[in-house]
Amino acid sequence: MHDHDISERLASYADVLAGELPDTWTRSHLPRDAKDDLAELADRIWDLDLVAASLAEHPLQQAAVLSRSDGAQLVLIDRHDERDGFLLAAVAPHALPDEAYRAVPEPNGIALTDDPFLGAEQVASDLLVRYDRALAQVRHNALGGIQPSQPDRVVLTWQPDGSVATAPADDRAGTILAAHGFAHDPQTDIYRLGGDDTQAQARALREIGPQLDALGIDTALQHPVARTAPTAAPASMPPAPAGAHTLTARAR
């Protein structure tokens, strides 16, 4: 079977699957020549089981990405075991700290039949349930170490990795934060300023104060307080950051 035929088959299956899943999903395709995007996607595949084992033997050559309106993503890839169908895996969110993933079980991927309608039933009753549970916990973990802000006060919280994070209540504050290097995660509304360059970080923190003050918004910088995580099943694997999930399994 030619690459074009394989690509069309994957895209067609993904289109049907996206239309049959609960909620609204859109489909995009990463072809063979999108090497950088494929590599970045492979590092975010949230799996230490079936899909990770497949990728260890067959690096990602193409993929169909299904995206939900809240930022959740699933990736559909080819099988290489002489069976019909595809593999489907969850994708870890962007921009969340490694600590948010600790003690959260991986929502490992599944093998789908060649029938996308039956596949959608399998996804809705199995993978999506586990994925949504894992997403809720990592988002809770990410927010748990960040003190809440108010419309007239932005609270900046130091993180264990040296970054500074905040969840402003005012869009005006978010605009100023983004203009000074804070990366925005739309899934959690967290703005995070990395600590790799401490001089740049300090400069940004100095500069946002007067600009926020001009809007009548105070700033506070503090360390996180202790928190408790939501009830969840214990992790079946040792804690690991999302970016390392497939890298560890595939020993890249």
Image: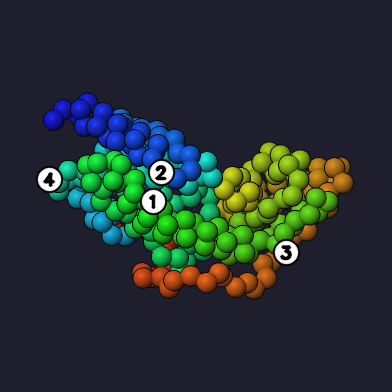
Give me the disc on residue 233.
none
Kindly report the distance in space between the C-alpha atoms of the residues bearing marks 3 and 4: 56 Å
Residue receiving disc 1: 124
Indicate whether 98 appears above or below 18.
below
Q: Amino acid at mark 1?
A: Ala
Q: Name the N-terminal-most of marks 3 and 2.
A: 2
Label 2: element kind? loop
Q: Name the N-terminal-most of marks 2 and 4.
A: 2
Crowdedness of circle 4 by 10 Å Cα count: few (<14), some, many (20+)? few
Residue receiving disc 2: 21
Crowdedness of circle 1 by 10 Å Cα count: few (<14), some, many (20+)? some
Please tell me which residue lies in front, 65 or 114.
114
Q: Name the N-terminal-most of marks 2 and 1.
A: 2
x then y, percent, for residue 152: 83, 51
Kindly report the distance in space between the C-alpha atoms of the residues bearing marks 2 and 4: 26 Å
Label 3: element kind? strand
Q: Amino acid at mark 4?
A: Glu
Please say if the residues under marks 2 and 1 sit with CB atoms less than 8 Å apart.
Answer: yes
Kindly report the distance in space between the C-alpha atoms of the residues bearing marks 1 and 4: 25 Å
- Horizontal arrangement in the rendering, residue 113 relative to residue 162 (left or right): left
- Viewer-nearest of labels 1 and 4? 1
Crowdedness of circle 2 by 10 Å Cα count: few (<14), some, many (20+)? some
Residue receiving disc 3: 222
Q: Amino acid at mark 2?
A: Leu
- Horizontal arrangement in the rendering, residue 236 relative to residue 193 (left or right): left
x then y, percent, for residue 195: 59, 54
Q: Amino acid at mark 3?
A: Gln
Q: Residue at x 56, y 63 (%)?
A: 141
x then y, percent, for residue 62: 29, 36
Kindly report the distance in space between the C-alpha atoms of the residues bearing marks 3 and 1: 41 Å
**Location of the N terminus (image quadrant):** top left
Q: Name the N-terminal-most of marks 3 and 4.
A: 4
